[in-house]
Image: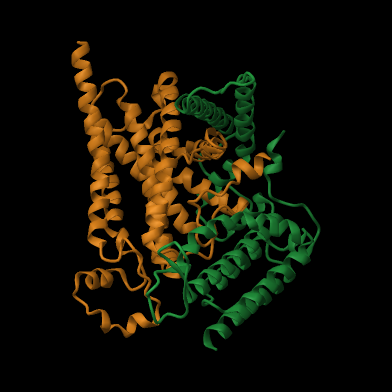
Amino acid sequence: MLRSEVLLSPTPMHIPDGFLSMGVIIVCWVLSIIAIGLALARTRKSLGERQVPVMGVLAAFIFAAQMLNFTVAGGTSGHFLGAALAAILLGPWAAMLTMTTVVALQALLFQDGGLLALGGNILNMAVIGPVVAYGFYRGVRTLLGNRKGSALVAGFVAAWVSIVVAAVACAMELGFSGTSPIGIALPAMAGVHALIGIGEGLITVGALALVTATRPDLVEAERAPAPAGMRWVWGGLAIAIVLALFSPLASPYPDGLERVAENLGFIERAQGPLYEVIPDYVFPGISNEALATIAAGVVGTLIVYGIAVGLAALLRRRERAAA
Amino acid sequence: MHLHALDTYLPGESPVHRLDPRVKLVLTVLFILTAALMPDRAWLAYVLLEGLVLAAVLLSRVGLGVVQKRSALALPFLLAALTVAFARPGDIGHGQVVPLPGIPWAVSEAGLWRFLSIAARSYLSVQAAVLLAATTQFPDLLWGMRALKVPRILVAVGGFLYRYLFVLADEARRMMQAREARSAVPAGRRGGGTVLWRARVTGAMAGTLFLRAYERSERIWNAMVARGYDGEVRVLSAPALRPSDWRAGVVGGLLLVLLLVLVRTV
């Protein structure tokens, strides 16, 4: 049935209650509330009295668009979270608010994600997702300039990165809560969502192509002034890199920084009555490679930018050949 | 098919249905908070909490089966927590470690208990949230949140989302039906083009849906302005809590706090 299969299919990114520790919950709520507060003030200024009806109906659009799906292979289907499309079409602030109401309604009405965990889910899907998407969209657009197809490349990159970064944030929250060892959660979440992100990217590009062809005046990211846009570019990149930097530290067994110190040999292994209270899980792959993981994360973020630059060069060459 | 079936509210006449939405919201969040603050392996406390939520379910007469079936939707996420049960063989001093043949990890006793504790607390919380949604109409939930000082604009946007969700979901369904109707697959052949092509079609559907939603929002705004809307959301003030609401809220709250204090201190 439609309801159970499509709209209620629990995505691997909606964290239920019981999975996050109190500390993580509080930090997530504080960050989310600050972001929502800013977004409320900004959209009130930009949308004025249209704020409520426009954002309410577009939030319903995001919700309904999540029902649209297409078969990929072997019974799996790609569908769509919408944070990137919302950010590109509405701008980051309005996207934050629409996504916040969508995520909150999913939790309240359909138990897709928990009520206490809502702070974390809002942070991942309604704050980090749109900000990163908008930043990468503007960034890639700036790199590519005004040539044909650059908006679509930028849209794809923005959608893919927003999904993967949100998944990484989710894995880190689980890691800090001691629910899921980061050495497993991070590669698993990032890996699954690197695939899901492709579907997200393709749908986002399709939607963008249609909207720019019929109502180009509606694409906010194209109208917004450039200097303000650059701030988002750096903001989005900063979030991605900070997450990459801190991801290997997201382990409560023992405290992440101590673990790095331990791995680097600063702390003797035998020295820890502290660690004996808590089981000191050691997983293959990360135990002595925290720095390598950090490097990999940063490199991965830069690679995405690199691919964008490469595509830009390719397009430029083709344009020159055509001219 | 209309998507009004989406609504998770189950109409009924019971003390739980009648309870003030503010009290219900606070009690539900308090219940989930209590579950979250329970230490690992507090099995007796988990059972008592389950007793509380089951008692509320029975009182609401929405049916035990319905609540369990809806709660099961959260179970797939447990896979994420299952990983905590594994440790590498050779890690010593943390309870029994059972190596598994063929894989480099083993099940550790401490990890297994942690996983089961997370699963129990999570399932408890989901049941409470399911009961809240099943016994409270969404508009009531909205004014409850409003009375509990959730920002007015956010609640108003939520109200619009709920109001137009069904309209747009119907629209999305009609589009999918139209796609189905145009996508005949001859017997013995693969239909539907490449994945890229299918994704582009779906993307165009999302884009169309966006345009329809946007244009609808403009019409709605015009209609609201024509009726005197000036950007202020005005609502009736919330009714006062009845004595029965007070009683339910205080008794429920005290029970939860008492349980938490007992478990935390003993």
Tell me the residue at 41%/37% (across/down). Answer: A198
Left or right of B63 in this view: B44: left
Return the x and y of residue A218 as percentages of the image width and height: 41, 27
| Nearer to us in this view, A290 or B211 | A290
Q: Is residue B195 above or below residue B116?
A: above
| Nearer to us in this view, A11 or B19 | A11
Left or right of B201 in this view: B128: right
Q: Is residue A131 above or below residue A176?
A: above
Return the x and y of residue A35 as percentages of the image width and height: 38, 52
Left or right of B169 in this view: A305: left
The chain coloured green in the image: B
Quarter holding the C terminus of chain B is bottom right
Tell me the residue at 22%/60% (across/down). Answer: A291
| Nearer to us in this view, B66 or B164 | B66
Quarter holding the N terminus of chain B is top right
- Colouring convention used in this rendered image of the protein: by chain
Tell me the residue at 60%/39% (across/down). Answer: B165
Return the x and y of residue A220 as percentages of the image width and height: 37, 31
The chain coloured orange in the image: A
Return the x and y of residue A1 as percentages of the image width and height: 68, 40
Q: Residue furthest right?
A: B13
Q: Is residue B196 above or below residue A66?
A: above
